[in-house]
Image (cartoon, rainbow, N blue to C red):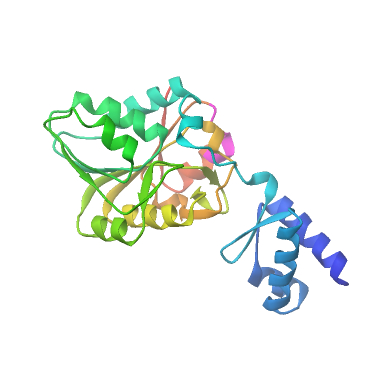
Amino acid sequence: MNTIDRRHNITQLALKQGKVKVNDLSSLFNISAVTIRLDLKFLANKGLLVRCHGGAIATNLISKEFSVEQKYNQQKLIKQKIAKLACQQLKEGEAIILDSGTTTEEVAKSLSVFRRLVVMTNGLNIAHNLLHSEHFEVLMTGGTLRKKSMSFYGRQAEESIQRYHFDKVILGVDGIDFNSGITTHFEYEAMLNRIMCEVAKEIIVVTDSSKFNQTGIHKICSFDKITTIITDPNIPDNFSQALKKAGVKIVIAY
């Protein structure tokens, strides 16, 4: 098979599967991983694929990253309903992590039903909404500020989280798909999110249904790591079945 045909087949395979891996392609075409990486680099430069760790993702499945300002009014009513249900998963006196994002911002606004919580966040917008919660202990991760998402990241943020243990982490996501699980666009945010998941007993994902069958480039965790996912009634049936099979509790915000 010549180079043109091989690259065409790689593109078609990525479109069909959503994601292709270097090692799998190397075995399939019986050529070196170095050659496959060159193929993927060529296809990425043409805009046909997007490189990710260990392989590439079809461009039609990559969700666009919006700023906090752009996302603020998207699906706002649904986000508010999801937030109220997220609060029902919490207990008085618990220690939680609230990830950055607009859905988690709605969760922060809904926490006023509690008298006592410990809340750590990497989100500047989240902390702002907890200013008047005088009985809460609010912790900031610190780190480097990413203005587009109003969130902190980096070694300082990671180390600050690793010093604690939490009951629950509430995560917003950029995409959910079968190959990658839950994902986000920014590599350092994904790294911080993974640490959040490691130090929490339960992982609660809050997302509207538009994020299903979309993917960010960087994986946070697979389905079987999630404790609960809160979404709207438009969750696709195949995702609902897959999540239930993985042991995930699904809560629907009507």
| Image: 248 above or below 69 | below
196 versus 109 height, above or below = below
Q: Is residue 34 visible?
A: yes
User: How many numbered marks appear?
Assistant: 0
Q: Residue 73: where, in percent of width, then height?
A: 48, 24
Between 249 and 17, the residue placed more toward the observer is 17
Bounds of the magenta segment? 234-239
Residue in the image at 58% along x and 39% along y: 238
User: Quick one: quadrant of the C terminus?
Assistant: top left
Nearer to us in this view, 68 or 166: 68
Residue 205 falls in image quadrant? top left
**For the point 69% across and 77% down, which residue is it?**
34
Answer with left or right where residue 118 lies relative to residue 12: left
x and y percentages locating residue 160 in the rendered image: 24, 57
* Residue 89 in view, yes or no: no
Taking depth in this image into account, of 142 and 11 the one nearest to the observer is 142
Quadrant containing the N terminus in the rendered view: bottom right
Q: Quadrant of residue 136?
A: top left
- What is the residue that sits farthest to the bottom in this orientation? 32
Q: Specify whether residue 175 is painted magenta.
A: no
Q: Please state if 52 lies on the left or on the right of 94 as rendered.
A: right
- Residue 237 inside the magenta-drawn segment: yes
Q: Is residue 105 left or right of residue 174?
A: left
Viewer-side residue, 236 vs 31: 31
In the image, residue 229 above or below residue 165: above
Q: Residue 28, position in %: x, y?
A: 74, 71
The residue lying at 27 percent from left, 51 percent from top is: 142
Residue at image coords 49%, 55% = 219
